[in-house]
Amino acid sequence: MLSSETDLFSAIICAPFGFVGIRTEAENVSELVYLPPRFAEKAPTSKLAEKAAKQIDRYITQPDFCFNLPLKKVGTDFQQRVWNAISSIPRGEVRTYGQIAKHIKSAPRAVGQACGANWYPLVIPCHRVTAAGGLGGFAHHDDETGFYVGIKRWLLTHENVPGYTQEALWNPK
């Protein structure tokens, strides 16, 4: 890992599936990023980064934890509609891309694209959106054995979503 990569983040915290990078800008969290195991932890550089790191840690230990972070407004109006719909999915449940699309009067593929463009994974729980016939992709990746889809499996198992058991956990090597 290059030091310039860690300089991109206000904090990097360890998670069971790798790391989470936290970016802040002024008084807002500007992005959360799933990072592979080649990264290392980085202590928060601001009070806001520290608050975000603590909340992510709480979620990792308590899947019912509700985030309360100031988020920078990003995305198109359409993406905002998708992200609002996703944010209403309770822990322990999933919706399909088609169900979200029907709810907001759109198309499943467009919903999938908006899910992949989510700047605030965990806070906006896009992992709770699946394909009609299976897991679906995650973070613009659809390799069923890849790093990102492994994170989605871990998160659904962590939240006790029916059909996702300990056998579905992805263990980084």
Image (cartoon, grey):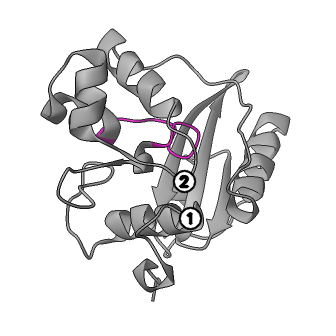
Residue 99 image point, x, y percent: 27, 33
Disc on res. 54: none
Q: Residue at x 67, y 45 (%)?
A: 10
Q: Residue at x 24, y 31 (%)?
A: 111
Report the front residue among 121 and 91: 91
Question: Is residue 118 shown left or right of residue 20?
Answer: left
The answer to which quarter of the image holds residue 20 is bottom right
- For disc 1, the marked residue is 160
Main SS type for the magenta part? Answer: loop
Cα separation, mark 1 vs mark 2, equals 5 Å
Which numbered disc covers residue 92?
Answer: 2
Using the image, determine if residue 25 lies above or below residue 65.
above
Is 3 included in the stretch rendered in magenta?
Answer: no
Q: Is residue 132 above or below residue 103?
A: below
Q: Which residues are magenta?
A: 116-125
Q: Nearer the viewer, residue 3 or 172?
A: 172
Q: Position of residue 47 (x, y in %)?
A: 85, 37
Q: Earlier along the polypeptide chain: callout 1 or callout 2?
A: 2
Could you classify mark 2 by the number of other residues whose Cα lies within 10 Å: few (under 14), some (14-19), or many (20 or more)?
Answer: some
Give amino acid for label 1. Answer: Asn
* Callout 1 secondary element: loop
Crowdedness of circle 1 by 10 Å Cα count: few (<14), some, many (20+)? some
